Image (tube, coloured by chain):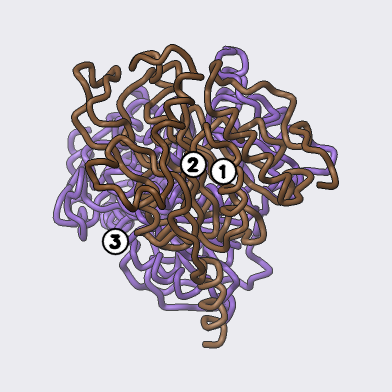
């Protein structure tokens, strides 16, 4: 490394608004370290899109870069408009599980299907944190939340499997308790041609942890570590045995023509006619 | 096909005229979702945009279409979508975002009979108020209303120019009749068509969200580190969600930049406007029957006149007040249940009797005979 990492190269002089112990800052650090290790000395050439929710505050307005803080769930289609008109820019979406697989789920599937060349980083804290701890599409079954006071009665969604099925070129899951792996996954996602997706399972001590019996963020991190098993280990387990587990690692790493490549080919054809 | 539609006479469908005008105005990005009676616009843009280095993408829904427009507009492109009532409802979320973030874009709403799915293939004019008040919060909209294939062309160019000039979403409120009819239209020599582009910041500029009525707009990827947000923000784009002054300053300016320019935005066609005994306030395809009805009235010795609104919002108060000074009666024919009527009543303020004539359903237009009957009846009452 020719130059030591300093977050100052990438951040505006504004403090993150996160609660003590929030995983958001960890994800931000992992991302910036990934960018640094890829040789970017600033964030020029990147555009960040985010929606509504705590993790949407990671890039906007904190990153010293162009950022568009969209309506709830619409960061991916806004990113689509940017990438189609400026394929030379690196477009990165940050969002929570509510943004990406709740209200904005169909946009995620279609971006993966189109193989839009962007990176989506989903910070999954398994809860609607900013609005006070309501059940999410990712909340484990039977969890007590402010809108499931007797315990949740819906199964959670596996976002990584979903984007793999939809056609993502890179898909990985890590947690805020595995910072090195998370950083490496982000590096791979950023250098993937085509749609890339990283799920960062994260802790929300305020709206989730304290309500389900964790004393602090540290306990939650230990829990994330304990529950995590690798893709390889998971292959040996039954569906029942996997129920409470967080499967971490790479789920897809492949090459398909991307949306912008396909559009370029179509444009040539249109002009020949 | 040529890069741009050639000057001269063309026989064309309204929706296609709109699409060709968009290309001439500089539109290079279209995102949309299929819907009757607007689909021909998307189809034509899909064919034409790749020929001029533009991009048309069919998104997964109208919410995503509006979102994609916003992203593309921030790259510096001129952008458009086209839809009808049900899709227009879905777009309202990001129309509000475009207003709040001052993102130029053009939304063509080709009206059909609503509410809800209504009568998908039949004409209606029921989106007049939605075009004005569709999204939540305090806002002001600019809404244009074409009544012919020629105006589907002319007002589309104007819509892009206004979007760029005022940095705001513009609603082009067509209807099924003007969208699907085919008639002659004339394209002027391209150098005679005024094209307005958004003002770009100078390298020293830092405030892109205030400081003046319409601030300059940077694009992403130009090194401005622009922070765009739908939350209340200061002139530098920084969020202030608790400070009442920042909110007042922002939203008052956003509404003001349209309200303060209401007079220059006003655009109408008039006949005997300030000398008629019976006046008609009309817009969109309904106005085509008004021309004939006024002719019939004139032939039978009645002094009838009309104001046809080409800009519906901001509402052209002054010309209507001028009409009310002389006219005893003002008739408001609409293919909806009194959406413009109450607005005319508000503006006229008792100076003339305002009469509503409506017809909804089945795409049936008000006929010249029906309107002539109303004109005669109001003269007899006088």
Q: Are marks 3 and 2 in contact (CB under 8 Å)?
A: no
Q: Which residue is mark 2?
A: A174
Q: Residues within 10 Å of mark 3 (few under 14, many from 20)?
A: many
Q: Position of residue B146 (x, y in %)?
A: 41, 55
Quadrant for residue A117, please give it: bottom right
Q: Chain of mark 2?
A: A
> How far apart are the alpha carbons under marks 3 and 2?
47 Å
Q: Which residue is mark 1?
A: A181
Q: Which residue is mark 3?
A: B37
- Residue at point 77%, 37% (across, down): A5
Q: Position of residue B263 (x, y in %)?
A: 56, 36
Q: Residues within 10 Å of mark 2 (few under 14, many from 20)?
A: many
Q: Which chain is purple?
A: B
Q: Secondary structure at mark 2?
A: strand
Q: Residue most toward the bottom?
A: A273
- Residue at point 84%, 42% (across, down): A3
Q: Which chain is brown?
A: A
Q: How many circles with numbers are drawn on the protein?
A: 3
Residue B291 visible in the current orientation: yes
Q: Are marks 2 and 1 in contact (CB under 8 Å)?
A: yes
Residue B81 vs A96, above or below: the answer is: below
> How far apart are the alpha carbons under marks 2 and 1?
7 Å
Q: Residues within 10 Å of mark 1 (few under 14, many from 20)?
A: some
Residue A178 vs B55, above or below: the answer is: above
Q: Chain of mark 1?
A: A
* Residue nearest the viewer, comparing A265 with A155: A155
């Amino acid at each position: 490394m020719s130059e030591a990492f300093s977050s100052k190269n990438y951040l505006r002089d504004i403090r993150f608004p996160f609660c003590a112990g929030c995983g958001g800052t960890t994800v931000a650090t992992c991302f910036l370290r990934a960018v640094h290790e890829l040789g970017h000395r600033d964030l020029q050439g990147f555009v960040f899109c985010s929606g509504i929710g705590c993790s949407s505050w990671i890039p906007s307005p904190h990153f010293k870069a162009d950022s568009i803080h969209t309506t709830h769930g619409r960061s991916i289609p806004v990113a689509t408009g940017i990438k189609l008109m400026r394929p030379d820019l690196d477009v990165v979406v940050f969002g929570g599980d509510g943004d990406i697989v709740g209200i904005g789920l169909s946009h995620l599937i279609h971006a993966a299907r189109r193989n839009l060349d962007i990176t989506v980083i989903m910070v999954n804290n398994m809860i609607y944190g900013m609005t006070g701890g309501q059940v999410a599409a990712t909340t484990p079954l039977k969890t007590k939340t402010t809108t499931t006071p007797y315990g949740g009665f819906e199964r959670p969604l596996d976002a990584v499997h979903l984007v793999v099925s939809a056609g993502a070129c890179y898909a990985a899951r890590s947690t805020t308790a595995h910072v090195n792996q998370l950083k490496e996954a982000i590096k791979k996602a950023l250098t993937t041609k085509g749609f890339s997706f990283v799920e960062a399972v994260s802790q929300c001590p305020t709206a989730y942890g304290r309500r389900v019996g964790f004393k602090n963020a540290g306990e939650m991190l230990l829990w994330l570590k304990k529950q995590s098993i690798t893709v390889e280990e998971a292959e040996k387990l039954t569906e029942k045995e996997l129920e409470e587990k967080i499967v971490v690692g790479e789920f897809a790493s492949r090459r398909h023509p991307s949306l912008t490549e396909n559009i370029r080919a179509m444009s040539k054809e249109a002009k020949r006619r | 096909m040529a890069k741009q539609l050639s000057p001269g006479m063309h026989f064309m469908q309204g929706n296609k005229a709109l699409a060709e005008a968009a290309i001439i105005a500089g539109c290079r990005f279209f995102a949309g979702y299929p819907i009757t009676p607007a689909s021909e616009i998307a189809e034509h843009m899909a064919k034409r945009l790749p020929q001029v280095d533009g991009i048309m993408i069919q998104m997964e829904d109208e919410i995503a279409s509006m979102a994609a427009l916003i992203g593309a507009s921030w790259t510096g492109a001129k952008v458009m979508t086209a839809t009808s009532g049900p899709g227009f409802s879905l777009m309202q979320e990001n129309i509000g975002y475009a207003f709040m973030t001052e993102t130029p874009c053009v939304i063509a709403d080709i009206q059909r009979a609503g509410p809800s799915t209504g009568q998908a293939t039949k004409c209606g004019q029921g989106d007049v108020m939605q075009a004005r008040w569709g999204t939540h919060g305090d806002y002001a909209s600019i809404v244009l209303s074409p009544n012919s294939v020629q105006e589907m062309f002319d007002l589309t160019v104007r819509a892009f120019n206004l979007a760029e000039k005022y940095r705001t979403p513009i609603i082009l409120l067509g209807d099924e009749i003007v969208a699907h009819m085919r008639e002659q239209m004339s394209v002027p020599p391209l150098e005679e068509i005024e094209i307005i582009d958004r003002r770009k910041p100078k390298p020293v500029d830092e405030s892109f969200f205030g400081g003046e009525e319409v601030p300059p707009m940077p694009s992403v990827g130009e090194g401005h580190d622009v922070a765009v947000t739908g939350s209340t923000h200061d002139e530098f784009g920084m969020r202030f969600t608790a400070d009442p002054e920042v909110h007042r300053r922002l939203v008052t300016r956003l509404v003001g930049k349209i309200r303060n320019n209401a007079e220059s935005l006003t655009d109408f066609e008039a006949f005997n406007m300030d000398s008629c005994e019976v006046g008609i306030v009309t817009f969109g395809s309904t106005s085509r029957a008004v021309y004939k009805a006024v002719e019939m009235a004139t032939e039978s010795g009645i002094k009838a006149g009309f104001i046809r609104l080409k800009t519906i919002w901001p509402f052209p108060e002054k010309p209507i007040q001028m009409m009310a000074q002389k006219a005893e009666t003002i008739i408001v024919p609409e293919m909806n249940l009194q959406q413009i009527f109450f607005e005319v009543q508000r503006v006229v303020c008792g100076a003339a009797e305002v009469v509503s004539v409506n017809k909804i359903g089945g795409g049936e237009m008000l006929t010249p005979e029906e309107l002539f009957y109303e004109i005669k009846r109001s003269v007899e009452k006088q």
